[in-house]
Amino acid sequence: MTRPRLLRMGIVGGGRGAFIGRVHRTAACLDGNVELVAGCLSSTPERAIESGRDWGLADDRNYPTWEAMLDGERKRPEGDRIDFVSIVTPNHVHFPVAHAFASAGINVICDKPMVTTSEHARQLVEVVRSTGVVFAVTYNYSGYPLVKQARQMVSAGEIGRIRKVIVEYSQGWLASKIEESGQKQADWRTDPARSGAGGAIGDIGSHAEQLVSYVTSLGIQSICADLTSFIPGRRLDDDANLLVRFCHADGRECVGAGGDVLDDEPGARGILSASQVCVGHENDLSLRVYGTKGSLLWRQEEPNQLVHRIDGQPERILRRGNGYLGPAAAGATRLPAGHPEAFFEAFANVYQSAGEAIRARLSGRTDVGGIGLGGPFDYPDVVDGARGVEFILTAVRASASDEKWTRFEIPG
């Protein structure tokens, strides 16, 4: 049997001094199905070329600007140009790059949040639907095997109708004004011109929202938000606390997934907390889902176990890599039980699923949408990205409003 050829990857951003660029490169190539062949690794042409040389890019595919990269790749023979581009720049650069490559028919894998405005999100949804390209957004926490197991259990009704969801993402790295010390990541993430309207709510709160959506299939009906900037002079929030009322993903009022709607029981409720001023916390993301029959608990810093509690029974701990887990968790697992898998592997699972969709598109298939578009491939897609953008903007709007509840409008 002939082994499928490697998918050819291009990358925009992620050069010298950038943490996330190497994460994307490592994740994409982890399973040996992808090779990085082209890139523009910085917004500064000289630095882009230097970074490309660091990564061993060939001179003729080590581009000074992303525009030159798009032009150069389009001029190459179809069997030699990149199959997809990964966008790992600061947020404000996502839209022009993603829109240009998608419009040219090149598949896109974009870091989150996808863009910074509702209009840009709408335009990306439209171009993806018109061109049929694969467009993935790297909400990497949905790639963990036991997150996939939690999703399967909720869908199967194992914890009953969802009543309450609590999701927390606590970090402490912005507890002081390190953006004034020359710290590159802090500098652009606290700058509204480059980060967008949300600070902590956009950077990590968007991950929390997507994790809830992925596991529960619940949509957001309305939000009551309190966003705060604790550090004097900081222009974006560094702490966010939200009350959430949930509905079905299509906007219908609901009690929760996994059961029938009861007229005499209110819809599911939630609490979402995202903070970057929690001193002593690193990447403490946790999700608790409470249903009428039981509950689930998962923590990103202990990602290889899922706690399942059933009413009136002892709790049980499900561990990654065991035969009692479902096919989604098994398919996202690389190592035997007891050998920890974590961040890189979860990231790689997003690339793996998007890569399967890209191969399917190359073979002529058109049903390559992900979760949001209802296709057969398990990756966060452009519709999930658009919903995430709307979530950030709604939270910012809700925090500034005197109204208790702000309606969440599902992007079209």
Image (tube, rainbow, N blue to C red):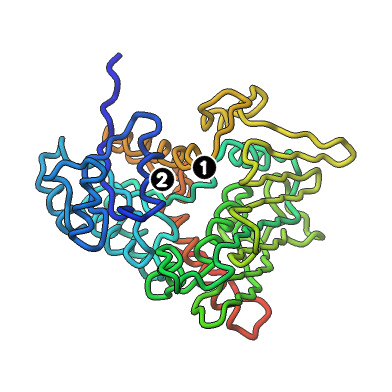
Q: Is residue 33 above or below residue 13?
A: above
Q: Residue at x 73, y 44 (%)?
A: 296
Residue 205, horizontal then vertical, whole percent? 56, 62
Going by the image, does 312 lie left or right of 201?
right
Q: Residue at x 25, y 38 (%)?
A: 8
The amino acid pointed to by label 1 is Phe
| Label 1 close to label 2 by CB (< 8 Å) | yes
Dot 2 amino acid type = Val
Label 1, on which residue? Answer: 343
Secondary structure beneath disc 2? helix
Which residue is nearer to you in this view: 30 or 109? 30
Q: Is residue 103 left or right of residue 382?
A: left
> Viewer-proximal residue, 191 or 392?
191
User: Where residue 23 is drawn, which disc sits there?
Assistant: 2
Which image quadrant: the N terminus?
top left
Examine the image and state in which quarter residue 386 appears.
bottom left
Looking at the image, which residue sits at the far bottom? 402
